[in-house]
Image (spheres, grey):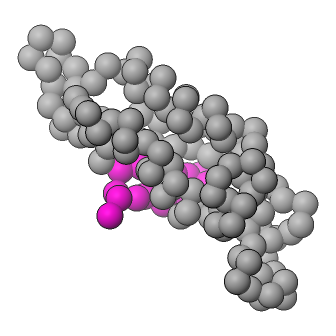
Amino acid sequence: MLLTRRIEFSASHRCVSGELSEAANHALYGAESNESGHGHNYALEVTLEGEPDPVTGMVVDLKEVKSVLERAVVAPMDHRHLNHEVEPFDRVVPTAENLAVEIYRRLAPEFAAGPARLRSVRLYETEDLWVEYEGR
Ligand code: NI
């Protein structure tokens, strides 16, 4: 069974690649590359996989899930400038794609011991744009 918990956080970023020239960055990322940076209200959906416990009827203790998400994602990322304050985005472009990979990387070990394992993360940068990552 799959269980999904949604949380939101706000962060600012600027999309530029150190591998590209300033002109190439601007041509590729457009306003996302503006020097001042800008914010997004991200929504994160974390999907866990497990079986309902026969006694509790629950796949996982939702209080613990919320606590993990707040500690591993919200606390280090909410109201931060990703490029300047959150590793590894001083050297990795903080696109939604790369942010989803990093969030997955941080969350997977938190759920590795069960009872529910991390299945995927879906990160919405806007209402109409999201990425989904299921690990490798
Ligand atoms: Ni942006």
Compared across the picture, whether 127 is left or right of 62 comes to right
Image quadrant where one finds the N terminus: top left
Q: How many marks?
A: 0
Compared across the picture, whether 23 is left or right of 57 comes to right
Whether residue 131 is in magenta: the answer is yes
- On screen, 70 above or below 61? below
Compared across the picture, whether 30 is left or right of 119 comes to right
Residue 64 location (% of width, % of height): 40, 21
Residue 129 location (% of width, % of height): 56, 60
Chain part drawn in magenta: 120-136
Direction right: furthest residue = 36
Secondary structure mostly seen in the magenta stretch: strand
Direction left: furthest residue = 54
Residue 27 location (% of width, % of height): 78, 86
Which residue is depicted at the point 80% across and 71% down?
33
Which residue is depicted at the point 84% across and 59% down?
37
Q: Is any part of residue 9 visible from this angle?
A: yes
Image quadrant where one finds the C terminus: bottom left
- On screen, 67 above or below 43? above
Which residue is depicted at the point 80% across and 87% down?
21
- On screen, 101 above or below 20? above
Quarter of the image holding residue 38?
bottom right
Q: Is 18 in front, or is 97?
A: 18
Q: Is any part of residue 29 visible from this angle?
A: no
Residue 55 location (% of width, % of height): 12, 11
Whether residue 132 is in magenta: the answer is yes
Q: Is 91 in front, or is 13?
A: 91
Compared across the picture, whether 47 is left or right of 19 comes to left
